[in-house]
Image: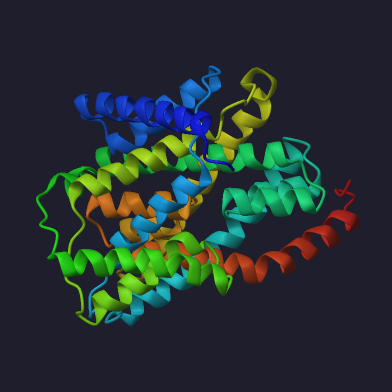
């Protein structure tokens, strides 16, 4: 996309609306105010026809910054508890499979989606990637994009409110505490992690390169003690506003009156996926002794960047959470083709494929 004056105006409008929404949520003391407020205001504006836009190049830049912030939360003893990581990885695999089959079933039965559209709509991967691949395979790109966008929207809202009202955790606490950014050398090193990590990860075709590349470099330097900086609260808030506005801006040009059914179905799927993640997290937490709430964030069906910023803002184990969402993306890349073939086989056998 060409970054011209028209694009800049639409981006500025999106950020102004998002910041205003965040300020309102902050004033009302609502959970995760800067992200939920920006997301709510931008979504409403987009559906009312406001020409807002958050270009991928700008969002990817902010996600790269988020990557170095997350990487800075890794410590030398991050992998000391092997049991926690084993349980987490097992849970990610189970949750992904359950979410996919549940989503596909609901979209086929309730929404009458064709199998390709149902599969790529229910796969909890990246919105852009699933939409592009789904369209290439013959699916409906509008419905795929809508389902993923609404799923993330629903998951972020439910999880933020859950932690505020049921866990007594104020999601803004991390962003509002005082953190002193390290010296200038650390700052330049972190910037270098973003500048080098993103294109390097793209070059070797790592999934979610804009986040995983900078995160990996930053985490490596943090674990080895080269850098010891904490993210400044202003940067965390800015990341929330940009990501929240980007989620809302996805609905620009969406004629909601014509997509009421798919929209409501996507909300239902989002709720069910969040419930499945919570149920699995609780069960594994009871069995293993690992915190069920941390596992819940690690299994949640939100976007990689969105769930990571929630964990970072809550001051929870953001390194654990973000790593598991990276694992989810990698697992999907590996198992999705096999599950797709299985769905086609079952669809033909039971006459569900059309």
Q: Which one is nearer the viewer's eye here, 214 or 349?
A: 214
Point out residue 228 in the picture as x, y percentages from the top left corner: 16, 71
The way the protein has been coloured in the rendering is: rainbow
Point out residue 93 in the picture as x, y percentages from the top left corner: 54, 68
Point out residue 126 in the picture as x, y percentages from the top left corner: 56, 53
Q: Residue at x 48, y 51 (%)?
A: 303
Q: Residue at x 72, y 41 (%)?
A: 141
Q: Residue at x 25, y 48 (%)?
A: 235
Point out residue 96 in the picture as x, y percentages from the top left corner: 56, 60
Q: Picture quarter containing residue 231?
A: bottom left
Q: Which one is nearer the viewer's eye here, 32 or 278?
A: 32
Can residue 350 be seen at all in this image of the molecule?
A: yes
Q: Picture quarter containing residue 333?
A: bottom right
Q: Residue at x 25, y 78 (%)?
A: 223
Can residue 286 be seen at all in this image of the molecule?
A: no
Relative vertical location of residue 166 with respect to residue 116 in this rendering, above or below = above
């Amino acid at each position: 996309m060409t970054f011209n004056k028209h694009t800049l105006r639409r981006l500025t409008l999106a950020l102004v609306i998002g910041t205003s929404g965040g300020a309102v949520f902050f004033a009302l003391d609502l959970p995760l105010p800067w992200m939920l407020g920006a997301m709510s205001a931008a979504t409403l504006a987009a559906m009312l026809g406001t020409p807002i836009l958050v270009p991928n190049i700008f969002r990817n830049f902010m996600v790269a910054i988020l990557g170095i912030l997350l990487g800075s939360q890794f410590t030398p003893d991050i992998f000391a508890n092997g049991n926690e990581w084993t349980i987490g990885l097992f849970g990610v695999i189970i949750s992904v499979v359950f979410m996919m089959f549940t989503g596909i079933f609901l979209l086929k039965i309730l929404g009458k989606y064709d199998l390709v559209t149902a599969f790529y709509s229910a796969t909890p991967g990246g919105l852009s990637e699933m939409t592009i691949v789904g369209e290439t395979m013959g699916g409906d790109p509008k419905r795929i994009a809508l389902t993923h966008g609404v799923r993330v929207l629903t998951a972020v809202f439910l999880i933020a409110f859950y932690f505020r009202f049921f866990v007594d955790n104020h999601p803004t606490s991390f962003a509002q505490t005082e953190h002193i950014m390290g010296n200038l050398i650390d700052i330049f090193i972190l910037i270098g992690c973003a500048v080098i990590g993103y294109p390097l990860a793209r070059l070797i075709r790592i999934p979610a390169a804009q986040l995983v590349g900078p995160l990996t470099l930053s985490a490596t330097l943090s674990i080895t003690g080269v850098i010891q900086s904490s993210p400044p609260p202003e940067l965390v808030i800015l990341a929330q506003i940009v990501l929240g506005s980007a989620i809302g801006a996805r609905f620009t040009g969406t004629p909601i009156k014509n997509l009421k059914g798919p929209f409501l179905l996507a909300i239902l799927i989002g709720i069910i996926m969040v419930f499945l993640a919570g149920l699995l997290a609780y069960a594994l937490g009871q069995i293993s002794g690992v915190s069920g709430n941390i596992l819940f964030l690690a299994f949640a069906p939100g976007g990689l960047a969105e769930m990571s910023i929630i964990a970072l803002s809550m001051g929870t184990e953001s390194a654990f959470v973000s790593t598991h969402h990276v694992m989810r993306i990698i697992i999907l890349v590996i198992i999705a083709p096999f599950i797709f073939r299985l769905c086609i086989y079952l669809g033909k056998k039971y006459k569900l494929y059309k």
